[in-house]
């Protein structure tokens, strides 16, 4: 079972190393240390670490945490070992925290069109495609897909699964 904890600046080396694991380039973004430090200093950001058996297994960066917009962004989710299929559980636990600790009515994320594995994983936990989004050139791509999860749908999905 995965447990989530709020990350601290001391966790930045793990976050950066995980962003840079082989196979992640072109699928997820990566920041330098100063950008992560700025993000930690912003109270509208929240970093979560997933732990299994006491060891970190991945992280999630959440933006627009507890803002009045009603929308919360999953900026980045990365697990250290994709073959273990723990990303969905990690993301689900973070979404539980978002809906329990904030007034967010929607959680959204962007996914690159070629990242079909992520699209399937997000769809499986209740995210739905909403629109095409133009995204600043990241990881060599200029377009991403917008996926949204409504609070009401999360309760329905969670009780069904």
Image (cartoon, rainbow, N blue to C red):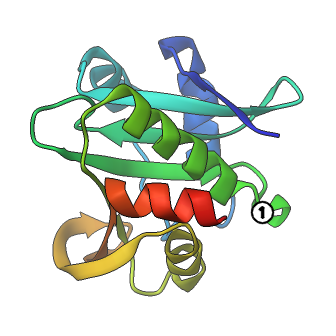
- Asked if residue 24 shows in the view, the reply is no
Residue at numbered disc 1: 85
5 sits left or right of 51 in the view: left
Q: Nearer the viewer, residue 158 or 44?
A: 158
Circle 1 crowding by C-alpha within 10 Å: few under 14, some 14–19, many from 20: few
Q: Position of residue 22 (x, y in %)?
A: 69, 61
96 sits left or right of 82 in the view: left
- Asked if residue 23 shows in the view, the reply is yes
Q: Quadrant of residue 88?
A: bottom right
Determine the residue positioned at 34% across, 58% down: 152
Q: Position of residue 54 (x, y in %)?
A: 84, 23
Position of residue 30 relative to residue 54, above or below, is below
Determine the residue positioned at 67% across, 64% down: 161
Q: How many marks?
A: 1
Secondary structure category for the residue under label 1 = loop
Determine the residue positioned at 55% across, 37% down: 16
Q: Quadrant of residue 40?
A: top left
Q: Position of residue 91 (x, y in %)?
A: 56, 50
Position of residue 34 relative to residue 128, above or below, is above
Q: Position of residue 156 (x, y in %)?
A: 48, 63
Assign the N terminus to one quadrant of the image: top right
Determine the residue positioned at 57% across, 35% down: 15
Q: Residue furthest right?
A: 53
Position of residue 132 relative to residue 50, above or below, is below
């Amino acid at each position: 079972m995965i447990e989530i904890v709020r990350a601290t600046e001391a966790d930045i080396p793990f976050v950066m190393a995980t962003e840079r694991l082989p196979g992640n380039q072109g699928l997820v973004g990566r920041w330098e240390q100063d950008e992560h430090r700025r993000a930690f200093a912003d109270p509208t950001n929240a970093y979560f670490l997933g732990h299994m058996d006491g060891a970190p297994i991945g992280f999630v960066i959440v933006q627009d945490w507890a803002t009045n917009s009603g929308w919360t962004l999953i900026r980045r989710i990365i697990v250290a070992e994709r073959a273990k299929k723990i990303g969905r559980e990690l993301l689900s636990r973070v979404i539980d925290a978002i809906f329990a600790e904030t007034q967010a009515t929607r959680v959204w994320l962007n996914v690159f069109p070629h990242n079909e594995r992520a699209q399937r994983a997000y769809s499986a936990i209740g995210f739905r495609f909403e629109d095409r989004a133009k995204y600043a050139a990241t990881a060599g791509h200029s377009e991403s897909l917008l996926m949204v999860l409504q609070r009401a749908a999360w309760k329905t999905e969670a009780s069904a699964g």
